[in-house]
Amino acid sequence: MGLSVSDSGGSFELPPAGVHVARCYRLIDLGTQTSNWQGKETRQPKISLAWELLGDERTSDGRPFSITRRLTASLGEKATLRALLKSWRGRDFTAEELKRFDLKTVVGVYGLANVVHETRDGNTYANLASLMPLPKGMPKPEAVNGIQVFDLSNPDNNVWEQLSQKMQETILESPEGKAWFNGHPAAPDPTTEPVGAGVDFDDEIPF
C-alpha cells in the first residue's frame, strides 16, 4: 500500500505503566486487513508502530521495554492515527500535509509515551494511551534498537527476516503481502547489519 497516508499470544514482560521517554524504532506495513465489527466485514490498510521505552526500567535481559500500536493507515478527521500524531507533534496537520504524509518521518523520533495497564478477561495488557512531544532541552537517552521499516510497496527482505512469525503471518494475510511473497527473494546474509543501525536524527521532531 505504501507508507504515505491521506485524508481519504506467548509470555512476555509487561511494560511498566506511567510516562516514559520513548523512541519510535519500527514501522511495519501490514497491508489491507479484513476485520469484522458488529457483523460487518471491513477491509482497511493497517500499520504497526513500535516505540522503545528508554527509562531506567528494563526487561530481565537488560533491554528496553517496547510498546506497539496497530492502527488504520488513515489521516481522516476521526482517525486514531491522526489523533496520535497530532498529540505527538504538538499540532494538527495543515490541509497541504493532509494530502500526503510520509509515515517514515516518524521513525527515530522521540516523545513522551503514556503507558496504561488494562485488565480484560483476567489478563493485563499494556497500551499506549497517548504521545506528547519531548520537552525542549530534555536529554534523549541513547537508542538501543535498530530501525525497522517494512513497506510492501518496496519490501526490504532483511527487515522481513527480523519480524516475528506472527507478524509475518499477518502481513501474508493481506492481498499485498500475498502478491509480494509469490516473488519472495532469498534470505539475506545473517551477518548483515540491521537496517537503520547507527542512524542519527536531528534534535527537532521532523514531522
Image: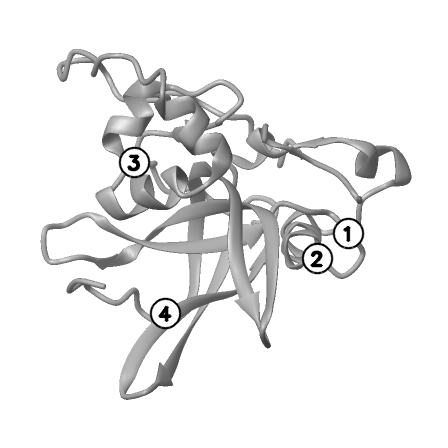
Residue on which disc 4 sits: 126
* Secondary structure state at the residue bearing disc 3: loop
Is there a contact, CB below 8 Å, between mark 1 and mark 2? yes
Residue 189 percent across, percent down from the top left: 16, 11
| Mark 3 and mark 1: Cα distance apart in space | 31 Å
Looking at the rendered image, the quarter that the C terminus falls into is top right
**Picture residue at 10% right of the left edge, 51% below the top:** 61
Amino acid carrying label 2: it is: Ala
Viewer-nearest of discs 2 and 4: 2
Amino acid carrying label 1: it is: Gly
Count of numbered badges drawn on the protein? 4
Residue on which disc 2 sits: 79
When asked about the image quadrant of residue 100, the answer is top right
Amino acid carrying label 3: it is: Asn
Q: Is residue 93 above or below residue 42?
A: above
Residue on which disc 3 sits: 145
Residue on which disc 1 sits: 76
> In the displayed image of the protein, which residue is found farthest to the right?
95
Q: How packed is label 1: few (under 14 Cα within 10 Å), some, or many (20 or more)?
A: some
Closer to the camera, 182 or 187? 182
Choose the circle earlier in sequence order: 3 or 1.
Answer: 1
Closer to the camera, 200 or 101? 101
